[in-house]
Image (cartoon, rainbow, N blue to C red):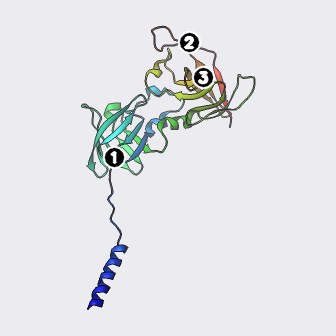
Amino acid sequence: MKKILLYSLVLFAYSACKSPVKQETSDRPTGVYINKTLLDSIDGEKLISDLPRLCEEIRFISDDTLEMNDGFETSMVHYSNNGQNNFILDFSDKYQFPFSMDNENLLLKDTGYLHQANGSTFTKSEKGFIELVNEKIISGKYFLATGKTRDTIIFTNKGDIENWNSWKKYEICIAGDCTSMSEEPANIINLSNGEAGDFFVWKILSDSIKMALVLYPLSPELPDIKGERKILKDSLLLTRIK
């Protein structure tokens, strides 16, 4: 009898060790989602500041809170789970937006706010929105077509500039005060040495043979006036190295 009891205890202990431990899972979204609808619309020609969007990035913080980055500021926003991957975003007292999750995509029904037929698709990404814009539009190797030498100038995805005078950083203007730096509506970029910098209008020129980045300097700032600077004709032509 003792042998049978001992055998039963050993068998029970062995079965307990072999049984999988049930782990708790969470249905809440996690990570960072970038506005793919907006990213796909940025082509180097359209004014970025005019493209409709609620925000550029969404970062999930907890079961009921997320961060929204609109290119100018970051806001903490409440959301709720309606079940089966359907959620409600409490954007403001006036606006509440439903959104759903589909694999690595977030489908935000912000049609009423943006006054357009379709909502916005956000995609989960390890890279930030600005880095993806840089990668799509600006980053690459160039040479200064108007320079005496053809030294290779590099614009990285991270916003760094290598081997071009004192310029060390660049930042494409997405939203905020920088969008009104020029007198005429234009896409704006800031070049800096890591501290001080200045704004330029940027344009992409491309054909079947080559692609170039053109930078137009702006006139000096006027006292007590922010922005509204004239676009100068003395452009810098940077030809892309394939």
Q: Position of residue 4 (x, y in %)?
A: 29, 89
Q: Does label 2 or label 1 sit earlier along the sequence?
A: 1
* Residue pictured at 47% horizontal, 21% vertical: 178
* Quarter of the figure that contains the C terminus: top right
Q: Position of residue 209 (x, y in %)?
A: 68, 34
In the foreground, 39 or 16? 16
Residue neighbourhood size for the residue with mark 3, other residues' Cα within 10 Å, grouped as few (<14), some (14–19), many (≥20)? many
Identify whether 65 is placed above or below 187. below
10 Å neighbourhood of mark 2: few (<14), some, or many (≥20)? Answer: some
Give, as a three-letter code, the residue at label 1. Answer: Ser
Mark nearest the camera among 2 and 1 is 2
Q: Is residue 157 left or right of residue 20?
A: right
Which residue is disc 3 drawn over? Answer: 215
Q: Is residue 190 above or below residue 34?
A: above
What's the distance in space between the residues labelled 1 and 3, CA to CA?
A: 41 Å
- Image coordinates of residue 36 in percent, x first then y, are 45, 40
Residue type, numbered disc 3: Leu
Residue, disc 2: 219
Q: 105 left or right of 1?
A: right
Between 40 and 103, the one lying in front of the other is: 103
Q: Secondary structure at mark 2?
A: loop
